[in-house]
Image: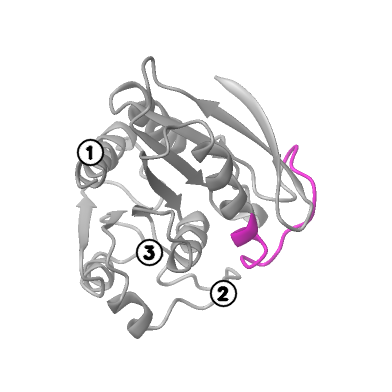
Amino acid sequence: MQTVSFTTEDGVRLEGELRMPDGEPRGAVVICHPHPKHGGSKDHPILWAIRNELAAAHACAVLGFNFRGVMGSAGTYGGGRDELRDARAAIGLVRERVPAEAGTLVVGWSFGASVALREALDDQRVDGLALLGMPLRPGDVELPRLPEAAELRVFARPVLLVAGEGDVYAPSDEVRAFAASFPHGEAVILPGTDHYLWRREKEAAGVVGAFADRVLNRR
């Protein structure tokens, strides 16, 4: 594991951890964490499980990082809008560590899923999206609006949505319907868990890993 730091386009210095595979990486992955105002950081068991799965079993260079204002990252919380710059800079960093022809996957959980989706809409470097616990019903949690259906219909890259069957922020029926909004969307609902994917971390990581293989094999 390598500790890294990098700077966004608006001059904010962020911290992260980069895990490289044993051999040459076949893909680049950025992981976006949950809400900074609700205890979110790169250091969650589900994010560790995904990072380790993608690096060890799928030969990806994987960057987990902290959004601005979280732990050792400079700056202040940006309402889910400035964090797009954070994700954009993270993609740039990890792509520097892989061959030019390697694909790029962005993984987000909860708030991080919202950021990942909105960044990918305008970032052609992203070849696929894995969105866990997509906050379709955020309640009183501050989040920018979801993209319009017309924006989703023209997003032709693969999208995976994963949620626990008891996730109150991402109800199963709504997750399936949201996945169907994309030309190449799919949904996986994990039984016996909730928004935090307790006791299903390895299973969720395996689902994301299989999806990563499908995305990278398309290239």
Secondary structure at numbered mark 1: helix
Quarter of the image for residue 136 reads: bottom left
Query: To which residue does mark 3 refer?
Result: 168
Amino acid at dot 2: Pro
| Label 3 – label 1 distance at C-alpha | 29 Å
Q: Mark 2 or mark 3: which is in front?
A: 2
Query: To which residue does mark 1 refer?
Result: 213
Amino acid at dot 1: Asp
Residue 114: numbered disc = none
Quarter of the image for residue 85 reads: bottom right
Instruction: Please check the rendered image and state whether residue 66 is part of the magenta-colored stretch, yes or no.
Output: no
Q: Nearer the viewer, residue 161 or 18?
A: 18
Q: Earlier in the sequence, mark 3 or mark 1?
A: 3
Asked if residue 193 shows in the view, the reply is yes
Q: Nearer the viewer, residue 177 or 87?
A: 87
Identify whether 23 is placed above or below 123.
Answer: above
**Residue under the point 25% across and 71% down:** 182
**Residue under the point 75% across and 50% down:** 69
Residue 144: numbered disc = 2
Q: Mark 2 or mark 1: which is in front?
A: 1
Q: Earlier in the sequence, mark 2 or mark 3?
A: 2
| Label 2 – label 3 distance at C-alpha | 18 Å
Q: Which residues are magenta?
A: 71-85
Secondary structure at numbered mark 3: loop
Q: Nearer the viewer, residue 73 or 138?
A: 73
Q: Would you say 193 lies left or right of 97 here?
A: left
